[in-house]
Image (cartoon, rainbow, N blue to C red):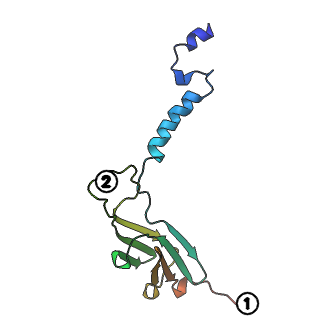
Amino acid sequence: MILKRLQHLPRWADPFDDGGQWRQLMGDIGRKFYDEPHAGVFPLLNVAATQDHYIVRAELPGIKKEELDITVSGNNLTLSGERKIMAENNGARYHRREREAGKFSRAVSLQGPLDAEHVTASLKHGILKVVIPKAEEAKPRKISIL
């Protein structure tokens, strides 16, 4: 009697199935969101802090320093620019295209006030390094006991 009722359920809802149909359905949904090429977050960043300054490293392969705009305002760092990718010749067809071109902007909020006057930046081998000193009032102070 129970088996007769279960025959009318959709195949993926069969409790006696080992989960294969369910895994296939969920796999199809997952591939839709994760396997298709997309630009994602660009550029990828690492942010580190020392006692005196912040160090931000960004991956920017193929981008020239003239194409970048770096701004520090308040406690925010903003990196923006445009990534250009050369097109293949006219007869080429893409089998896979994952690298995206276009304008980008990435903002990072850092703790405490920053010393915007003494920020330094360098770009070497596609890695941008920005060193942002902390403002004097944001630096930790050692308090002596009287």
> In terms of sequence position, does the residue under pointer 2 or pointer 1 come before the other?
2
Classify residue 113 as left or right of residue 2: left
Q: Which residue appears at 54% of the width and 85% of the height?
A: 137
Say which residue label 2 marks. Answer: 92
Residue extending farthest front: 91
Could you say where residue 28 lies in the image, as x and y percent from the top left? Answer: 48, 36
Could you say where residue 17 lies in the image, as x and y percent from the top left? Answer: 61, 23
Q: Which residue appears at 44% of the width and 66% of the height?
A: 43
Q: Which residue appears at 53% of the width and 70% of the height?
A: 46
SS at mark 2 in the image:
loop
The answer to whether residue 123 is above or below residue 87 is: below
In front here: 111 or 144? 111
Say which residue label 1 marks. Answer: 145
At label 2, counting other C-alpha atoms closer than 10 Å, the crowd grade (few under 14, some 14-19, many 20 or more) is few
At label 1, counting other C-alpha atoms closer than 10 Å, the crowd grade (few under 14, some 14-19, many 20 or more) is few
In front here: 91 or 79? 91
Could you say where residue 85 lies in the image, as x and y percent from the top left? Answer: 34, 64
SS at mark 1 in the image:
loop
Residue extending farthest bottom: 146
Identity, as a three-letter code, of the amino acid under mark 1: Ile
The answer to whether residue 123 is above or below residue 92 is: below
The C terminus sits in image quarter: bottom right
In front here: 73 or 43? 43
Residue extending farthest top: 1
